[in-house]
Every structure is written in structure tokens, then in C-alpha cells.
Amino acid sequence: MAEILKNAGSHRILAIMAGIDGKNSLQLIEVAGRTAYQSRDKITDESAVRFVKMLRDRGHESVLEHSCMTVEFNDVCRGFTHELVRHRIAAFTQESTRYVDESNFRVVVPPDKDPDEKIVELDFPDGTKIKISFREWMELNEQMYQGLRKANWVAQDARQVLPIGIKSQIVMTANFREWRHVFKLRTTPNAHWEIRRVMTNLLNDVKQRIPVIFDDL
């Protein structure tokens, strides 16, 4: 039976790029940024935060590209991933529907919708009409997919019946400047409800870890 997922999308930060000699990423950005001013002699143990904030506030965000972050997104739908991969300055690795058997259906549904409400009327050739719910339609998709697999259709062929709401996993690596761009677009009120929720949670997380990079958003 298809599993319905509501507000299940989550993130896991896999890595934040370290700096020189294992120091933090802000110190790496400072070293790179001070190349422009030939002022590395002014670096201290406490100077990185002030320097990076100065760059950010002046709009010199290109220097933030010297450090990056890798994030894993779980239990998001294929629609989420379709939007995410539109961000071009990044690396992505996603769960493959060509090679992964999706017979165990897990499907994302909008949080404000009742998956069991019988809302759509189907018309059959003999004149019969029945109303079915979102969950029932997903279970029909599931039965079709499983039937095609049992009929020896390989996963890459059977996936033609998979809904865009099927759950997925994706890993994204991008530099800090690109992550700022992602947050600016994907946490706004008009962003899609799933990506907005997941990205807002991620933004709140990174504000705690590396505030000077993201706390102005």
C-alpha cells in the first residue's frame, strides 16, 4: 500500500568545507579575500568573522565562492528535485529511477490536502462513474508499476508510470554564494510549499553553524 508523506522532507548537512590547515571555512575565505588587498598580515584568530561580514555587507559575494557545503535532502518528491537542479552552479547526485526499484511506493502529498477525500470522478466506457481519492490513485499507480516489474519490465521502463510526487533523495554541493542565492529564491512566500519548508529549515540550521554567511537572510 502506498505510503503518504506529509511534511516529511528533511536535510542533513554532510560537509562544510574546512579552511587552511583544518581551520574553519571563514578563515579560508579571509585568506582568499585578502589577496585583493595584499593584507594577509592583518589576519588574526578573530579577524575572519569581521572580514567576511565586510565582504558580505559590501556585496563582494564572489569571495564567498571559495568555500562550499554539501547537503543531503531526504523524503522529498521528484518535483522538489526538478526545481533544485535548476540551480546551475552546483553538483547533484540523485536517487535513480532507472536503477532503483520503486515498488515500495512513498508519495509526497501537499500538507493541507486530505489524501483520503474522494474528490475526482472517473468515467468508465460502460458508463460507470466512481469517485476516488488521491491515496487510491497512488495505489493504482503502485499496482501498475509493480505489475510492469513482475512482467519483466526493467525499472527504467516501468518508471514511466511513476508520479512526480514519488519520494526521492538527492545530494547537492554548492559554494556559499550559490547557497545564498538558493535561500533567497526558495524561502520566499511564493516558493513551492515543499522546497520552502525544507530550505527554511536548512537556512535556520546554517545560521547557527556559520552565521556571518547567512544571518542576513
Image (cartoon, helix red, strand yellow):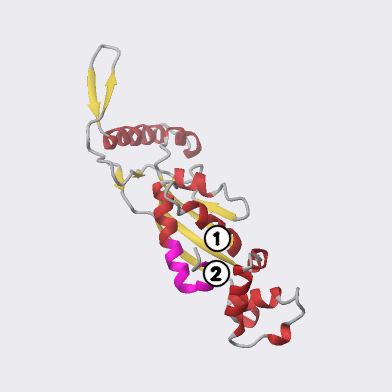
Q: Secondary structure at mark 2?
A: helix
Q: Are marks 1 and 2 in contact (CB under 8 Å)?
A: yes
Q: Earlier in the sequence, mark 1 or mark 2?
A: 1
Residue 18 appears in the figure: no
Q: Examine the image and state in which quarter residue 179 appears.
A: bottom right
Q: Closer to the camera, 123 or 25?
A: 25
Q: Examine the image and state in which quarter residue 140 appears.
A: top left
Q: Secondary structure at mark 1?
A: helix
Q: Is residue 10 magenta?
A: no
- Quick one: which residue is furthest to the front in this view? 58
Quadrant of the frame with the N terminus: top left
- Pinpoint residue 3: horizontal percent, then vertical percent: 30, 45
Q: Is residue 111 left or right of residue 153?
A: left
Q: Amino acid at mark 2?
A: Ile
Residue shown at 43% from the left, 67% from the top: 205
- Pinpoint residue 49: horizontal percent, then vertical percent: 57, 79
Residue shown at 77% from the left, 79% from the top: 38
**How crowded is the residue under tag 2: few (<14 C-alpha within 10 Å), some, or many (20+)?**
many
- Pinpoint residue 14: horizontal percent, then vertical percent: 50, 66
Seen in the picture, residue 142 relative to 47 is either above or below; the reply is above
Q: Amino acid at mark 1?
A: Arg
| Residue wearing tag 2 | 213
Residue 119 - label: none
Q: Closer to the camera, 94 or 76?
A: 76
Q: Main secondary structure of the magenta part?
A: helix
Q: Is residue 168 left or right of residue 127?
A: right
| Residue wearing tag 1 | 180
- Pinpoint residue 135: horizontal percent, then vertical percent: 27, 37
Q: Which residues are magenta?
A: 202-214
